[in-house]
Amino acid sequence: MGKSRTKRFKRPQFSPTGNCQTEAAAAANGTGGEEDDGPAAELLEKLQHPSAEVRECACAGLARLVQQRPVLPGLARRDAVRRLGPLLLDPSLAVRETAAGALRNLSACGGFEVCDDMVTKDIMTPLVALLKECSAGLDSNEMSPQEKKDQNRNSVENIVNEAVNVLWNICECSSRAVSIFNKEGCLEIVLKYLSRFSTNVDLAISVAYCLQTVTEDNPELLKSFSVTALHVLESAMLSPVSSMEYILLKTLVAGTIWNLKDIIPSKSQAEIINAILKILSEVLDMDAGETVIQMKEAETQKLKTAAEMEDVLENANGDDLIEDDEMEEIPRKRKVRRKTFISDLLPPTDKELRETKALLTAQQTALEIIVNMCCNEDPSDDEWEELSSSDESDAFMENSFSECGGQLLSPLCLSHEIHTALTNYLIPKKIFEKTAFPNNIAVDICSKNPTWKPLIRKMNTIQCRALVCLQSLVSLLDMDHLGGAPALQELAQHLSQLLFSQQDFAKHADFLEAMSSALRALLQTMASKNISQCMTPDQLMTLCKAGIHSSNVGVRVNVVSILGITGSVLAKEDGTLEILKTIGCFLLEVATKDPSLVVAGEALDALFDVFADGTEAERASIQIKLLSALKEFQPVFKMKIRKEGRGKYSPDQLCVLDNVKMNLRRFVTYQETVEKRLTS
């Protein structure tokens, strides 16, 4: 498997507030298919209105409207990006915030094409100008603790948060945006915002997401990282605050620092790896299911207490209502004060939900970072020689991450250090635990509450990421680091139980892809070490028959490969004739009928493995008439590669298919020898 790109989770979409609610709702109910009199045209026209309140409401309406995919082409035709862009620098802070919110939603909902078009429409110019202006404003006006509560300051940071999300979305989808990020010195700007993590963790999290994106495979940007910049990242990653939002922040920063490994002096690499994996280990230590249960109970109790207090105060206020003209004004005043007092008592109602989401996202991100660490290619000698070794940089890194310790790293031992740290922090064991299905009680609680229900999907995603992570670990680590043969057999049994405990597992595409990938890697490792397999023939065929009908090519490739791995083991055993015949017929059907040449090629490879050797395999090949079937298919396969290959498949895939074509010719020759020997 190639390098797994870290995926972002879907953030809550921008939600308009205040007087704009009505206009936003009306826009959301629009058809989007109308031309001049449609909601899009009307809202875009209002962006030029002299009233700031009207402009704000129009932006809020567009923020809702862009979430309807059918309206996006119409908005593009009407040049929505060029109309919204200047409003990022509008004199009104409220307009700036809602304009940034609309652009955030547009970039999040529109995908790669829309984001690339936004860059073409020059959205980066006002966006970068806004970020620079806000940064200068915050720097030039250092406020006292009391002044920091000022609404104007909060509004600026809210605007920045929306703008950073737009920047993140666009940079994730457009290499041109990343190039502009590099050239415009955006790194220094966003790092200033990250340095404010102690007072605005939400903004810091948005910046950390953006940094994790722009530092990936971006050597030009890495040259811009100074010692001061690394100190900012270090401070955020080693923050002592342990709230779940800070856990998410530290996890994201750890991912960014991993992306910077090539600019960190080689003698400090070991400490960096240990620091990163220490944080990821702590994240994975937390029981997400129990957290959901506890946080939901805390939310319920908080709301119950608030309701009881309100009842008490209402009753107390009612007792004071004396029917006397002289006392008439007193209850009125108390009523006003009571309302203010009650609202002050109530903390944000979604605090527990936000904290829980943060933890689940942190765990998902941690697993994705581990996958990337496992899939990292070892650097060449030349690359290591180019690593920074300035006295200033070395001095900084010698003092960094001191609490994590660790031996100094030889330039060519990155993989060894990763293997050792993974084992020391018990990462394989923790990932194994995360592959289990989500806590039933937590799922039941979430399913009964609309605002918590989306967490079920997040918990399922963590399980899938853990399975992908497990695949990487099994492929990367040697058997001793995984616990030896007994541990592998236990793991195989665990995965089988997970798979077959779900009667409708084939309907869950993400789960099936992750599970089949993990099983494929595990069975391959077990076969190479001559460790006995755990799946029965019936289980094997159930998995393959379900998986081969998946619309996901990866699932089909995995199940065909699993069949080849298991079949090649069975071919060396006695009494396996019937199951080998079943496997052979199944693989032949896939090779000749699957619409994907990649799957067909994998099926042919599996046939070569299963019937390459062994008495039972030779007998089975004769009985299923393997040779005649392959001879008939050989010219068809060549023709398909010639006709479909260059238009539908990558150069790497075509190279693999050419090898399969050559091996098919050789295998046919081999089968001719086998058939002649057995039938003569």
Image (tube, rainbow, N blue to C red):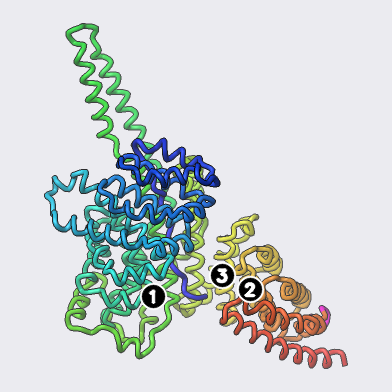
Q: Is residue 515 visible?
A: yes
- As drawn, 346 above or below 157: above
According to the image, label 1 marks what residue? 217
Residue 520 image point, x, y percent: 58, 73
Q: Which residue lies most toward the right here?
A: 680
According to the image, label 3 marks what residue? 517
Element on which disc 1 rests: loop
Residue 326 image point, x, y percent: 17, 8
Q: Residue at 31% across / 73% down in the picture?
A: 274
Mark 1 to mark 2 CA distance (whole Å): 33 Å
Q: Is residue 623 magenta?
A: yes
Q: Residue at 25% across / 12% down in the picture?
A: 321
- As drawn, 601 above or below 426: below
Earlier-in-chain disc, 1 versus 2: 1
Q: Amino acid at mark 3?
A: Ser
**Where are the magenta residues, as a range?**
620-624
Q: Mark 2: give few (<14), some (14-19) or many (20+) Cα within 10 Å.
A: many
Q: Is residue 293 visible?
A: no
- As drawn, 530 above or below 31: below
Q: Mark 3: give few (<14), some (14-19) or many (20+) Cα within 10 Å.
A: many
Q: Residue at 16% across / 58% down in the picture?
A: 139
- Main SS of the magenta part reads helix
Q: Quadrant of residue 226?
A: bottom left
Mark 1, mark 2: which one is toward the viewer? 1
Q: Quadrant of residue 372?
A: bottom left
Give the quarter of the figure containing the C terminus. bottom right
